[in-house]
Amino acid sequence: MRRLDQLAAALREQLGAHADTLVEDLGELTLTLPASALLEVAALLRDDEALAFSELLDLCGVDYAGYGGSRTWPARYASVSHLLSIRHNWRLRLRVFAPDDSLPVLPSLCGVWPSANWFEREAFDLFGILFEGHPDLRRILTDYGFIGHPFRKDFPVSGFMEMIYDEEQGRVIYQPVTIAPRENTPRIVREESYGGGRG
Amino acid sequence: MAELQNYTINFGPQHPSAHGVLRLILELSGEEVVRADPHIGLLHRGTEKLAETRTWIQSVPYMDRLDYVSMMSNEHAYCMAIERLLGIEVPLRAQYIRVMFDEITRILNHLLNIGTHGLDIGAMTMVLYTFREREDLMDAYEAVSGARMHAAYYRPGGVYRDLPEQMPKYQANKFKDAAAVGRLNAAREGSLLDFLEDFTARFPACVDEYETLLTDNRIWKQRTVGVGVVTPERAQALGFSGPMLRGSGIVWDLRKKQPYEVYDRVDFDIPVGRNGDCYDRYLVRIAEMRESNRIIRQCIDWLRADFAKGAGPVITESHKVAPPSREKMKGNMEELIHHFKLFTEGMHVPEGEVYAAVEHPKGEFGVYAISDGANKPWRLKLRPPGFAHLAAMDEMARGHLIADVVAIIGTMDVVFGEIDR
């Protein structure tokens, strides 16, 4: 039995109906959870002897607006975490969609894995996902006083404001950006039959 | 007299021992740290967002600039993610070259860490010794890629080109006469592999030298033993990886546990600490350099034998992913079109998502890539090991004296290129 099948079997046994969304792709398992069940399942994933996901390695926000592939997604924002079990040497990906696109709110995983703290701050900073129950939800990567969430798909790469040194005033000022956004290589998704198939 | 209260100081972002641009707000009670609040992001360049606007291959050089002291390891994780999405195999020779350069990178990184950690807490000479060996390894980087640091040598599907058969040499100038240049060139008469073999023969004695300076040094031990202790349970909860996790006594190394490339064919050991303090993590790093040296030696032997048999390719033959050779491109219309399409439109990566992790010198460096089938990533998330380590700053520094904060920053091996991205 492959390690991945063992993990899938263990997850189905311990999580019951929550494991229905388990998907295997490219040698990795992904579990999609509803926001309401996240904390309960996360605690189980960490504490259950047969699963023992002791580490949360990564948590990130994703914005699916304008996704060009064939898959469809139930909501615009999701938080994706990568878990690792040191004891059993296996990994799991957790995906949780924020129910409301205009105000994405998700429960915070800080209480289960303390390492989620900064990763959630980052997802809040870059995507504007609010984590309920987070002890200290401040911006982390962007500048003090930054407005907006720069990794959202509707935020241009050139930004909205720029910071320059003003000779006349003798100080640093903020002003609307003066560079126009440009795209050297357009984004292209090939149709299925192009060139006789993929690749 | 007014009652004394806690006061707050600003440590950095221009402090020399802040290892870059770390702004640390320390709340102190006397000299004791009550709370440490790291402010990061002063080097944030939005690499992940930039990658969404560039073709897959154009982002390879950005990876060098994440952790700018272990350049090739970052590229490795990124290339591995693309290869898994595409489902392509890397030629065996390229896998050995990658493993060899991953270990060269590990030595480069640990040399910088041990040198500057020593510098931070008073062992001023360390950095002079470690930078001497770094110079040789940088020359190996330069010989293979043309750049001393930002190599862009790993490419999806393999490595950019095979190892050079001649090592570049120094030339006499008004600062160095023929005799001095002759001494410098002694190890550079042969190929890159000869040069590296000479290095692996010399290097264990160099590590002994570093150890005579630090390992039993009373001041070094006073500054590191029992400082920044992390228990195995907390190390897992805080998301530690690499030497930070192994220093706490957990046997975990992706090269052994989830082998990638040819790590399952080379022989090496995983050094593990016992107490989880700064001193144990230092010992782990020293021992890791010796192990890396062993791995490099084994790779050299294999690459030599392979070369004698007539070296195989170092990058995939699929011209949808890797460019054709210049020679073929000049004489064949189809190859020319491949070349043109690859460097203008870029490669198309099938729809899907993948998380590829490598045992980076600092810990687990992961690349989470989502592709929607376009010529650019839909989302690229880089998982830097230092980010999780620095997040534990508050917990590790609390209750220590302010001078120990410097020792803790040093032991975390933070580099802001990767933390701020």
Image: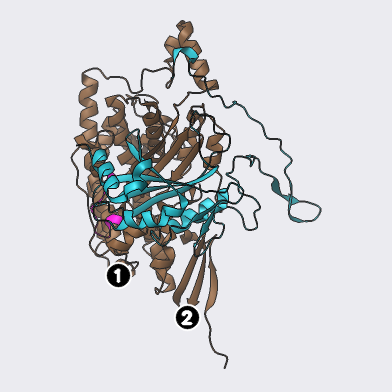
Apparent side of residue B143 relative to residue A128 in the rendered image (left or right): left
Please state which of residues B142 and B128 is positioned toward the viewer in this rendering: B142
Q: Are marks 2 and 1 on the same chain?
A: yes
Helix, strand, or loop for circle 2? loop
- The residue labelled by disc 2 is B30
Up-down relation of residue B416 to residue B337 (above or below)? below
What residue type is disc 1 on? Gly
- The percent coordinates of residue B4 (x first, y second) are 53, 86
Which residue is rendered at x = 51% and y = 23% of the image?
B346
Chain letter belonging to callout 2: B
Q: Quadrant of residue A159?
A: top right
Up-down relation of residue A178 to residue B413 (above or below)? above
Helix, strand, or loop for circle 1? loop
Apparent side of residue A62 relative to residue B274 in the rendered image (left or right): right
The verdict on residue A166 being magenta is no
- The percent coordinates of residue B310 (x first, y second) are 24, 17
- The percent coordinates of residue B323 (x first, y second) are 44, 19
Instruction: Tell me which chain appears brown.
Output: B
Let me know if residue B396 appears in the view.
yes
Shade of chain A as shown in the rendered figure = cyan
Please state which of residues B108 and B154 is positioned toward the viewer in this rendering: B154
Q: Residue furthest front?
A: A17
- The residue labelled by disc 1 is B226
Up-down relation of residue A58 to residue B25 (above or below)? above
What residue type is disc 2 on? Gly
Which residue is rendered at x = 19% and y = 43% of the image?
B268
Q: What is the span of residues highlighted in magenta in the rendered image?
A: B245-254
